Image: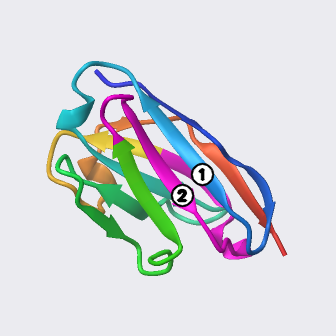
Amino acid sequence: QVQLVESGGGLVQAGGSLRLSCAASGRTFSSYAMGWFRQAPGKEREFVAGISRSGGSHYYADVKGRFTISRDNAKNTVYLQMNSLKPEDTAVYYCAATPKALGTTLSLYDYWGQGTQVTVSS
């Protein structure tokens, strides 16, 4: 069982930055691939970025070059650094964990956090 708690969301102007954190419980954090997803009002939840157990990363095309995912296994935490934010990045951001290989499909992920709101004003 893994419990995930996101933090770091908030209101920021377009062009600004935020860093999201996701703290995981348990002693097996390093054995999970981690993903960040987001869901805007009226839209489906979508993959944003993911990091494998070995540290390899994968990004949704619209955020590549602006967002960076990283993990600190000693702190059981995964981060999402978001730069050059745009109003269309506004959404609730969720982190998720899977014991399987890194992927972009929601159904791969067994554990989810409660989400943190990111609002980007124009």
Q: Is residue 1 left or right of residue 92?
A: left
Q: Residue 3, percent across and down?
A: 40, 24
- Disc 2 target residue: 81
Q: Residue 67, percent across and down?
A: 50, 67
Q: Is residue 31 left or right of residue 29?
A: left
Is residue 81 part of the magenta span, yes or no? yes
The mark nearer the N terminus, 2 or 1, is 1
Give the SS element for disc 1: strand
Could you tell me which residue is drawn at 21 percent across and 25 percent down? 28
**97, 56: nearer the viewer:** 56
Q: Residue 56, percent across and down?
A: 23, 60
Which residues lie in the magenta part? 72-94
- Disc 1 target residue: 19
Quadrant of residue 69 within the rendered picture = bottom left
| Residue type, mark 2 in image | Gln
Screen quadrant of the C terminus: bottom right
Give the SS element for disc 2: strand
Q: Is residue 18 above or below residue 66?
A: above
Q: Is residue 89 left or right of residue 71?
A: right
